[in-house]
Image (cartoon, helix red, strand yellow):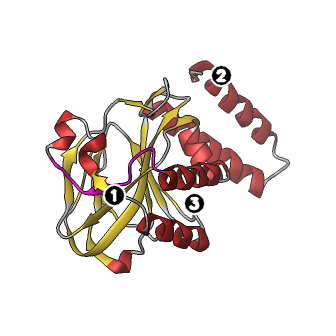
């Protein structure tokens, strides 16, 4: 599980929240699978709403300018971001995301290798609403500053705790990675991080070129395009 800071600027967050405040909201179960629908209690902007499309495009453009996201996710496709809102005791019980998502209005489907939540409401404006993810390191709760994002394997069990004060608005979406396997993707991320660190500290070190070759040869062997 990886936290990525400042995906959106404060100005972009304010613009997004202002537009979402004027959007139409519907029952969040419209995009839930059979099991998820039993435990999902929130509101959501329809996938084809103009506000959702415009803000989703803004987020995808921001992701392309975020090196940490590119390095960690190795994205092949990004599902158009959706937007949810929790208020008045709403929550989302423990569930796992659907493995395949159909992009509305298109023939395209993506495999959900990674799940992402981009927080839009400042954390001091609400209580509860903690994204809680169960992974190999145990149970981890996430409540980030506005504009920050968390990325985690979509195969993880997760839930959102009930809102007890205020309103929580966030974007959420999925990523199909070029590297299907979580362990291989994590290995490539660690290797890329090490190469970048070595390149900064000892830019003329011969190991930079050698390790870069190892990285790309592994990527060439494992990537699915």
Magenta stretch encompasses residue 95: no
- Which residue is drawn at the image coordinates 71% and 35% (left, top)? 211
Residue 88 at x, y percent in the picture: 19, 70
Camera-side mark, 2 or 1? 1
Q: Quadrant of residue 86?
A: bottom left
Closer-to-camera residue (18/116): 18
Secondary structure type for disc 3: loop
Q: Magenta segment range?
A: 39-49
- Distance, label 3 to label 1, CA atoms, is 24 Å
Give the residue pinned by disc 1: 25
Residue 161 at x, y percent in the picture: 21, 62
Residue 17 at x, y percent in the picture: 47, 69
106 relative position to 24: left or right: right
Residue 42 at x, y percent in the picture: 25, 57
Give the residue pinned by disc 3: 7
- Which residue is drawn at the image coordinates 21% and 41% (left, top)? 36
Give the residue pinned by disc 2: 220
Residue 38 is labelled as none
- 51 versus 135 height, above or below: below
Disc 2 crowd rating (10 Å Cα; few below 14, some 14-19, many 20+) is few
Q: Which sits earlier in the primary sequence, circle 2 or circle 1?
A: 1
Q: Which sits earlier in the primary sequence, circle 3 or circle 2?
A: 3
- Distance, label 3 to label 2, CA atoms, is 28 Å
- 112 versus 171 height, above or below: above
Q: Is residue 122 visible?
A: yes
């Amino acid at each position: 599980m990886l936290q990525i800071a400042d995906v959106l600027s404060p100005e972009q967050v304010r613009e997004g929240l202002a537009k979402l405040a004027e959007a139409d909201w519907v029952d969040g179960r419209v995009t839930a699978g059979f099991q998820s629908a039993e435990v999902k209690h929130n509101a959501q902007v329809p996938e084809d709403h103009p506000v959702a499309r415009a803000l989703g495009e803004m987020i995808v453009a921001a992701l392309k300018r975020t090196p940490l996201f590119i390095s960690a996710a190795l994205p092949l496709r990004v599902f158009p971001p959706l937007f949810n809102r929790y208020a008045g005791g709403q929550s989302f019980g423990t569930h796992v995301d659907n493995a395949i998502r159909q992009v509305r209005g298109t023939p395209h489907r993506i495999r959900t290798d990674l799940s992402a939540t981009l927080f839009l409401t400042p954390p001091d404006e609400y209580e509860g609403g903690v994204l809680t993810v169960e992974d190999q390191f145990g149970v981890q709760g996430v409540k980030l500053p506005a504009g920050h994002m968390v990325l985690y394997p979509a195969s993880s069990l997760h839930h959102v705790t009930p809102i007890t004060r205020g309103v929580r608005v966030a974007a959420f979406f999925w990523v199909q990675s070029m590297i299907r396997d979580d362990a291989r993707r994590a290995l490539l991320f660690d290797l890329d991080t090490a190469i970048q660190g070595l390149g900064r500290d000892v830019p003329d070190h011969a190991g930079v070129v050698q390790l870069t070759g190892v990285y790309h040869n592994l990527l060439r062997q494992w990537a699915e395009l």
